[in-house]
Image (cartoon, grey):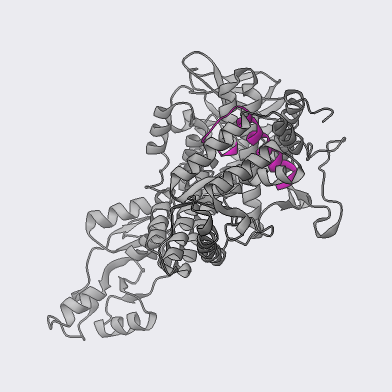
Amino acid sequence: MKNSIAERISDFLKDFPPFNLLKEKHLFEIATDVNIIYLEKGDTLYKKDEVYHEYFYVVRNGGVSLYHHDTDGNKHMVNINDAGDIFGVRPLIIKENYKLTAIANEESIVYAIPIDIFQSVTKNNVNVYKYLITSFASNAYDPYTAEENTKIFVDYLPNTSQDIVNFQTANYTKNPVCCKENATLKEAAIKMSEFKIGCMIVVDDKKYPIGIITSSDIKNKIATGLFPITTVVTNIMSSPVISDKKDLTVADAQLKMIKYNIGNLCITEDGTPNSKLIGVLTNHDVLTSLGNNPTAILKDIKRASRTKTLRTARRKANGLLKSYLDQNIPLTHIINIISQINDAVTMKAIEIALEKMPTPPPVTFSWLALGSQGRKEQLLFSDQDNALVFEDVAEDKYEETQNYFLELSKLVTKSLNKVGFEYCEADMMASNPAWCKSISEWKAQFRSWIMNPDDKAILLSSIFFDFNHIYGNQNLEKELTDAIYETLGKTSLFFRYLGRDALKNPSPLGFFKQFLVEQDGEQKDLFNIKYRALMPLIDTARLLVLSKQVRGINNTYERFEKMAELEPNNKELYESCAYAFKALLKFKTKQGILHNDSGKLIDLEALTKEEKLKLKRCFKPLHDIQESLKLRFDLANF
């Protein structure tokens, strides 16, 4: 008799990791024993310190929030799990009591996956456990506890100096060039030359690897006259070979090569020399894999002396970004790494430009990143937004000094454009005289925007108030910040203008909960996730921290988290906004990688039902925070 319930569960799970890594029969075996749990809003599935269950969980419908409890007993939301998300995997990974509390965010259906059965059908599936360990680190991560943060990232996830690439499967050469044990060295050498390879695996009749010949062997044993070129390969090959299975990680491969002082690993069907050869992993393969990690990329950037080299290094970060997203690395970790890389690219572009200038700078200056780079939220290539502040000079020297920095800025922006960052269509770049000024001129500019707000001033404020020092004299940036906050303390009208601007894009859902899409032009029927969802959150977070005189926090989700700290009564709303922003940014980035564009325009018809539900769930806190702004800044009739 058919088990229709198990079939429906299996059909749902197969679209989500790690279940999409399982064979159909194994997935059905798990689905047969899944428990279905119904939760009302506010129901608790498990609590902090509760004895671990015999299950881990998958959200079928609705949402389940994970909360951390601080030493005072206050709870802080860490994450919201949507349809297809797994959580509660601590018992599966390390058999410990729960560190977080799981509470239904709304009416929800949850699948409880029996751990024993899951382990029995996945015990040899390395990719499943890589995903689960990453997911565990992501869900267990507690942003409020440095000790927990350190423990998780040391034990399960890398930091910027020891990258996630170490836990990825090593890419080896499949179908390697081989020779039989009765072949002569001359025959082997001709083959190596023909295929441009540095080693040759010697195999027996069953294609089991019995030895390896390298270029060093030919140099040390043939060129020196120890053996004639006509000798059989078995006389000079290194034997026995060192082997491993196809799913070994880069880290494991490195350790094995170091332990045995070798440069090549044989990849066999069962990982031993007593099975068929299916590939070879060289030291070069390992180094190539390790080259796509933050430390290596940053080193490449620092060594770059030409824009072409800089472009190559920065484009490696795109592969890194995709890898991180595929492995469900926490977005906060991704943002920190890509932001470091973007800033390093800009710094190097400035250094290269300075070398091309005929003379050193006449005075000190500060290069400021604006917009998404200024907020450290620039994951994909986008257009440039930057400005330059230089020291005050005598009036008769101003034009000459400004011209120097305009020429420098043109070289920098040209270099960044070659790297992949488009020129700003609105010309909001340091190469524009309007955005390349002395510190006094910049102070006057911000004072004018704040004290005499109008639509143009507010538009520019949305870009220029998110500045971040990249290169040069940081005291200039600090001096400008001090002047801005001093002026902000003299007016409340400016905040009302910013509030009105934050409300210009209302909730992205219409009256019947349908998505509001573009109505005409090339973008017709597409959903603009940047302007309808992300920008309202960005604008709101900026307004709130400015009104609270909060300095040094530019990132949108960090701004909301700071507001949760400052206003405990609204903590849940602010934490929901922080989560929504990260979820939306991650979605936009994935779409951009998928379609090789900015990701801001989304074809809703190409999304799954679950993806649409996740998007809609992010819009609720946006609606709620906008309603809050109306009251806080008296915007109803403004």
Rendering quarter of residue 177: bottom left
Name the residue located 68 percent from the left edge and 41 percent from the top edge.
449
Q: Which span is picked out in magenta?
A: 529-556
Task: Reply yes or no: does residue 430 show up in magenta.
Answer: no
The spot of residue 66 in percent (x, y) is 57, 26
Of 458 and 566, the residue lying toward us: 458
Query: Picture coordinates of residue 189 (x, y %)?
Result: 29, 82
Considering the image in quadrants, where does the C terminus appear? top right
In depth, the one of 473 and 627 nearer the eye is 473
Examine the rendered structure and indicate whether residue 54 appears above or below residue 156.
above
The percent position of residue 310, horizontal first and vertical second, equals 46, 64
Q: Is residue 171 left or right of residue 486?
A: left
The residue that appears at 43% across and 63% down in the rendered structure is 354
**Vertical order, 214 against 310 (above or below):** below
Q: Residue, x 82% and y 48% (percent of image)? A: 517
Q: Residue at x 57, y 22 (%)?
A: 566
Percent across and percent down for residue 432 are 61, 59
Left or right position of 458 against 312: right
Q: Nearer the viewer, residue 24 or 615?
A: 615
Q: Can residue 346 be seen in this snapshot?
A: yes
Q: Is residue 555 magenta?
A: yes
Residue 592 drawn above or below residue 553: below
In the image, taking residue 355 as reference, residue 589 lies left or right, namely right
Residue at the far top in the pictured view = 72
